[in-house]
Amino acid sequence: MTQDGRRLRGLRSREAILERTVGLASVEGLDGLSLGRLATATGTSKSGFFAHWRDKEQLQLDAVEWAARQWKEHVVAPAMSAPAGVRRLFALHEARLRFYGDGVLPGGCFFFTVQAEFDDRPGAVHDRVARAMREWQEFIQRLVTQAKELGELVDGADPAQLAYEIDALGEMVIIHSRLHDGPAALGHARRAVLQRLRALCPEPALLPED
């Protein structure tokens, strides 16, 4: 096999391990996943596994990066195809609900699990998770600000407050859909954000009906 071929195979192996790690961590968290267990779960030899990661913290950091990329591909990118303004803001919420509803991750959401796991544990993983969550909030805020600039949200709409509400309603789905009625939780979260945006939009016809 050529050097390029070995590099490509190594990259594919690494991606497969990270995908599996993020899926397991969405259920169990990152800290409880040992390198040996992950090697077994992914069908990778321990020597092959340790060729990618020499320590657990680096694997955890890479898993956070992979999960952030996955989130952008499944949630952010689809929303960006919607028209700028209030429709893009609502499309972002719908893409998030679709991510949960489609069961992309067995535990629902990687970041929901790991932020609770690392919120009071200082260190590199804590900092990287915190940055991912901050960037997500800031992104929603930018969409709210853009919608205001386009005249599609009232001047009094507070970007930070509205971003917090939208994010909180999305997070509630993760809990309720697993403990209660999943489809109902998705419907409630969709309707709550839709009604909130319609109430703040001078042209509510831009958004769908309930």
Image: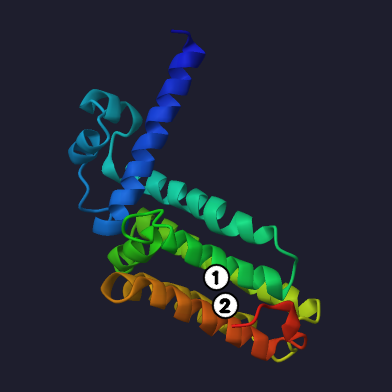
In the rendered structure, the answer to whether residue 183 lies left or right of residue 49 reads right
Type of amino acid under label 1: Gln
In the rendered structure, the answer to whether residue 41 lies left or right of residue 189 reads left
In the rendered structure, the answer to whether residue 158 lies left or right of residue 107 reads right
* Location of mark 1 (residue): 137
* Location of mark 2 (residue): 163
Mark 1 / mark 2, whichever is N-terminal = 1
Q: Residue at x 37, y 41 (%)?
A: 18
The N terminus sits in image quarter: top left
In front here: 38 or 192? 192
Q: Name which quarter of the figure residue 40 lies in.
A: top left
Query: x, y (%) of residue 23?
Result: 33, 50
Query: x, y (%) of residue 59?
Result: 34, 42
Q: Residue at x 79, y 77 (%)?
A: 149
Q: Are marks 1 and 2 in contact (CB under 8 Å)?
A: yes
Q: Is residue 177 above or below residue 61?
A: below
Residue 199 can be seen, yes or no: yes
In front here: 195 or 118? 195
